[in-house]
Image (tube, grey):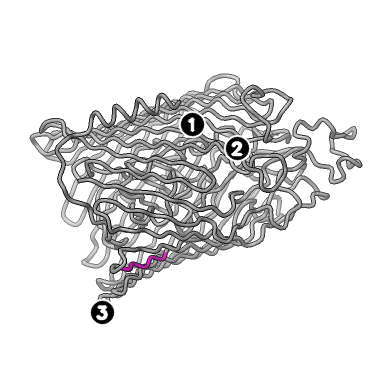
Amino acid sequence: MKKIVLITLLLCFNGLVAQVKDTIASDSKSEKLDEIVISGTLKPVSRLETPVPVEIYTTTFLKKNPTSNVFEALQSVNGVRPQLNCNICNTGDIHINGLEGPYTMVTIDGMPIVSSLSTVYGLSGIPNSLIDRIEIIKGPASSLYGSEAVGGLINIITKKTKNAPLFTADVFSTSWLENNIDLGFKANIGEKAASLIGLNYYNYNNPKDNNHDNFTDVTLQERISIFNKWSFNRQDQKEFTIAGRFFYEDRWGGEMQWNKSYRGGNEVYGESIFTSRFELISKYQLPTKEDMFLSFSATSHDQNSVYGTTLYLAQQKIAFGQYLWDKKLKNHNLLFGAAFRHQYYNDNTTATTTAEKTNIYSAFLQDEIKLAEKHHLLLGARYDYNNNHGHIFTPRIAYKWNPTQNDVFRINAGTGFRIVNLFTEEHAALTGSRDVIITENLKPEKSYNVNVNYLKKFRFDNATFLGIELSSWYTYFTNQIIPDYDTNPNQIIYQNLNGYSEAVGFSGNVDLVTPYGVKAIIGFTVLDPKNVKNGVTTQPVLTEKYSMNWAITYDIPDWFLSIDYTGNLYGPMRLPLLGPLDPRAEYSKPWSLQNIQFTYKKFRNFELYAGIKNILNWTPNKGNPFLIARAEDPFDENVDYDANGNVMATPSNPYALTFDPSYVYAPNQGIRGFLGLRYILY
């Protein structure tokens, strides 16, 4: 792998254009409320004009708490929580407004690149050097994006080649010896094309066991991600881009004495995951008078994972094509689209007897109507035909009212659907010793959602800007598939919910910019989720009741210094216990991760930054006797069962537990320092 990295670096440097402009980019612009967004309606529109509320997070925001990947960077976004799903291998997904990760669709430039497998295994491989901004929609977006967009959408917008710097570098390391290199290059190929290359390399190879359970606190990782985007100059000035990405990761966690010679064996427990992905994206604007676009994406994901003695081999391939026609009429802005998606999935689990091949044919229509100067109505509908599940219809309606230039009121309502592929999305089905029980043919999940949003802007005479955004929503699910940890502690039971689930929530964001060097983004979310099964109401597992996020910046120009204070706070979550004797807490305590960063900007083109992550030194093992159940017996060699297969309490196993690493809700990584350097050349 190190040879691959060195060769890649040499190729990238050899492709760098020699002539450069001797200027430096100024990126002091704060997150504004009138930026152009794409995700809400699949076409560029001012954030203030779109009836669909869209949140924007620029690279400026991402740099306030430097991370090696998008997955970790999103921990500072209100209502969005990166969720770890395993104490050992640290795979995870992204929750929006309390909904599980598979309900969140992640796209790159609007293309459905991040599929169900990579939602768990590949999110860490998106290099920050290619990102221009991240757009987030909270609530169903299935009428435009189809399945997987039930809970929300995270659209990663890559840099345009014409605006990208010639060279960028961001290198940092932590006191835990986590090393990250993020590089970006741009080359103009004559007058006809430009190429943008993004490279990320991450390495962590320093096993730690601070909680003394003989298991790694954080997985050991080595990964590389290479992104290349081409933009072609056409005589008619219409758009044509092609981009590709390769991602490879080798990660493992387990007993401290584990090495690859033990992979798949029963001598020393380890979880080892090899991930390999290829992605291709293309967008072509047709040479017609009308605004018409053809888009295409393709992915290939290979997974080779071992969880103790359990081998999980999976392959997923997706091809996606889409046609869009954007038509403007008097008081109407029409968008018509047609799409085709082919999915291939195969694994070695007993649930997959033959490879699953799915074809989805889609058509959607959207009409944004200008009812009056201050009133806009958006009507949309999508029809999908799935060769395995038949016909699916998802309507959508949105209304926007601007009573003044500084006030925006929006209401959105729509439906969503999700087709579940269990083993690609439910990591708990593969790790630990619980038996997986699937009681029926799982039907697609359906949701109904209403979201109300209000945005208010204040501009004061002293150049102070204040933006306040408030949202409230209600989501109702039928046929939801929820892992049942409670009926039998030795099993995870999967079935469509005989009842319903719902979530009511309220959130707020405050965006403040002052002339005194202080900028702040502060958000909060309050949730009331519940599952109703056979008339019994329970709180969903791993869903917080409330959360808060903040990013506060203080600029001191005379010192060439910026100070960033970022953090989050999460309320209690219900956790998956193994039985009535399990001594671990059923609910987590409120917890907070807080960080501080100092950035020195005196040197031309350079930024030197340093700081501390998790300054409170909080870890989830505090207040618990252990995190991993029976870490001393990972192969359950000393577990006794009764005639019905239930675990019995014995002197060596007084809590009647089996080995299980699924009791996890937060990173098990304490305080650490970091030091980094950024360089930008235009």
Which residue is most to the bottom?
461
- Disc 1 crowd, CA 10 A, few/some/many (<14, 14-19, 20+): many
Along the viewing direction, whichever of 165 and 391 lies nearer the viewer:
165
Residue type beneath disc 1: Glu
Disc 2: which residue: 89
Q: Tell which circle, 1 or 3, labels the residue nearer the N-terminal end.
A: 1
Q: Secondary structure at mark 3?
A: loop
Q: Magenta-highlighted stretch: main secondary structure?
A: strand
Q: Tell which circle, 3 or 2, labels the residue nearer the N-terminal end.
A: 2
Q: Is residue 246 left or right of residue 191?
A: right
Q: Secondary structure at mark 2?
A: loop
What whole-number distance in Å separates the C-alpha atoms at marks 1 and 3? Answer: 50 Å
Q: Is residue 354 above or below residue 59?
A: above
Residue at 77% across, 42% down: 489
Disc 1: which residue: 249
Q: Which residues are magenta?
A: 552-556
Mark drawn on residue 462: 3
Residue at 60% across, 54% down: 543
Q: Tell which circle, 1 or 2, labels the residue nearer the N-terminal end.
A: 2
Residue type beneath disc 2: Cys
Residue at 68% across, 39% down: 215
Residue at 50% across, 24% down: 315
